[in-house]
Image: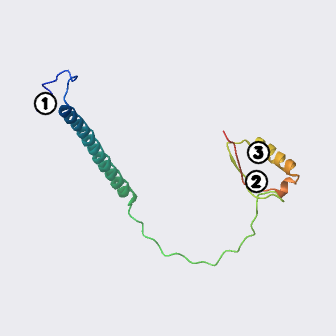
Amino acid sequence: MNFLAAAPDLENISLLNASIVAVLGYGMVFAGLIVLMIVVTMLGKAFSAKNKKQNEAPAAPVAAPVVSAPAPVAPVVSDAAPGSAGQLKLYDTPPKTAAMIMAIVADKMGKPLNELRFISIKEVK
């Protein structure tokens, strides 16, 4: 393979020699990608086998369930204030800011705060 001996400076390289160099370069890149793909696939299989082996713990013998009389049903007690509409989820918003936002919305809508239902308040950054 002495195809580059005629043009050591690579300025006067023929079209045939340039195409051979290009094909060899592309071949090397694709060979490297294939080897990398094989290595990543093998590592993935090794880690999934390791996780599967860890998750397969020996199962403890299960005793027969003991059936007892049904417990009396207690009335549902909510920790929400009377007239409120449930829980409010706050995302990156302090409670004081959320209270001001709810008060402003209720004022602008002209409705009492206990008639509105706020599900969540999130600060947009």
Of badges 2 and 1, the one in the foreground is 1
Q: Quadrant of the N terminus?
A: top left
Task: Give the left or right position of residue 31, taking residue 69 as reference.
Answer: left
Graded by Cα atoms within 10 Å as few (under 14), some (14 to 19) or many (20 or more), the crowding at tag 3 reads: many
- Which amino acid, by three-letter code, is at mark 1? Phe
What residue does disc 1 label? 3
Residue at image position (73%, 52%) is: 88
Residue at image position (20%, 20%) is: 9
Dots 2, 1 in contact, CB < 8 A: no
Tag of residue 118: 2
Q: Quadrant of the C terminus?
A: top right
Q: Secondary structure at mark 3?
A: helix
Dots 2, 3 in contact, CB < 8 A: no
Tell me the quarter of the picture where residue 69 sits: bottom right
Q: Residue furthest left?
A: 2
Q: Nearer the viewer, residue 11 or 79?
A: 11
Expressed as whole percent of the image width and height from the top left, the position of residue 26 reads 26, 38
Expressed as whole percent of the image width and height from the top left, the position of residue 77 reads 76, 64
Expressed as whole percent of the image width and height from the top left, the position of residue 60 reads 42, 66
Tag of residue 98: 3
Tell me the quarter of the picture where residue 54 sits: bottom left
Query: Label 2, label 3: how many angstroms apart (C-alpha)?
Result: 10 Å
Label whose residue precedes the other's in the sequence (2 or 3): 3
Q: Where 91 sits versus 65, above or below?
A: above
Label whose residue precedes the other's in the sequence (2 or 1): 1
Query: Label 2, label 1: how many angstroms apart (C-alpha)?
Result: 76 Å
Q: Secondary structure at mark 2?
A: loop
